[in-house]
Amino acid sequence: MPLYREQGVVLRTQKLGEADRIVTLLTLGRGIIRVVAKGVRRTSSKFGARLEPFMVADLQLFEGRTLDTITQASTLGAYGPHISEDYDRYRAGSAMVETAERLSEGGPAPEQYRLLVGALRTLAQGKIAPELLRDGYLLRALSAAGWAPGFDECVRCGAPGPHQHVAVQMGGVVCENCAVPGTPKLEPGSIVLLAALLSGDWSLALESDDLERGQASGIIAAYAQWHMERGLRSLRTN
């Protein structure tokens, strides 16, 4: 049975026996894989710390009948400690990796891999509010999966914006004529923030206030739940 190499982000781990772990990875070439890391829970393990959540590693794996086994691991991005030491960063990172796993099942997802690595790298640096990074990542990951929202023209009739109503089920902003009763109406700055997060314009996103961030976050959580059919567990404490 052959050996192969992969780059992967550790999404989560679970105990296996007394010393092993099953590691769920988002890899560059194969998408989501679940593999065995033998002996990593022992204090003498040479690469246990390299296989913690949020770490990015270059891996050598051995193909098995049911689960493949990691035989070597070298660190490409040591983001785990910097994210896990801060509760807000940890919570944001947990939402990111949960989203990545949900959106990347079924085969290779190189764009999702690159988005996640970039988001975790920035999150670990601690220079941008974790909630903003999380929300920006969610929008861009959903867009990469084929569900790009629209925050300029009315998504129903095409009327030019700006518009303040957001219809999650329709995929973005709607004009006054297309908004049905109960459609949320946001502050103008919240719409600007949503568009900035989608495009990755952090200089503009950082100008937002707490009200705008709260409104945008609520819309993004609802949009993610609508398209992924159930809410993210890691957002329920927010």
Image (cartoon, rainbow, N blue to C red):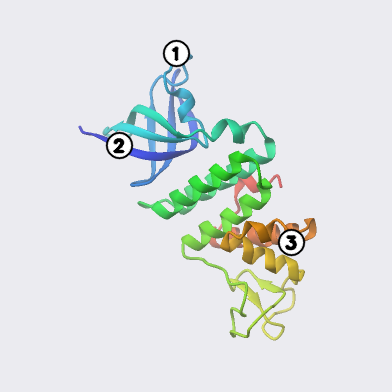
Residue under circle 1?
A: 44
Tag 2, which secondary structure?
Answer: strand
Query: Can residue 47 be seen at all in this image of the molecule?
Result: yes
The picture places residue 163, in percent across and down from the top left corner, at 69, 77
**Hey, what amino acid is under mark 3?**
Gln
Q: Earlier in the sequence, mark 3 or mark 1?
A: 1
**Hey, what amino acid is under mark 1?**
Ser
Q: CA distance from mark 3 to mark 1?
A: 48 Å
Q: CA distance from mark 2 to mark 3?
A: 43 Å
The answer to which of 45 and 226 lies nearer the viewer is 45
Q: Give the side of residue 123 with respect to residue 111, left or right.
A: right
Q: Earlier in the sequence, mark 2 or mark 1?
A: 2
The picture places residue 172, in percent across and down from the top left corner, at 61, 72
Residue under circle 3?
A: 215
Q: Which of pointers 2 and 3 indicates the residue nearer the eye?
A: 2
Q: Residue at x 49, y 51 (%)?
A: 115
Residue under circle 2?
A: 5
Q: CA distance from mark 2 to mark 1?
A: 24 Å
Tag 3, which secondary structure?
Answer: helix
Q: Quadrant of the image for the N terminus?
A: top left
The answer to which of 73 and 53 lies nearer the viewer is 73
Q: Give the side of residue 24 with respect to residue 129, left or right.
A: left
Q: Give the side of residue 158 with respect to residue 190, left or right.
A: left
Q: Which quadrant of the figure has residue 229?
A: bottom right
- Check the image and report above or below for 226 versus 55: below
The picture places residue 200, in percent across and down from the top left corner, at 58, 59
Question: From this viewpoint, which residue is outermost toward the top?
Answer: 44
Tag 1, which secondary structure?
Answer: loop
Q: Residue at x 79, y 59 (%)?
A: 211
How would you rate the neighbour count of disc 1 (Cα within 10 Å): few for under 14, some for 14-19, many for 20 or more? few
**Hey, what amino acid is under mark 2?**
Arg
Q: Residue at x 56, y 47 (%)?
A: 96
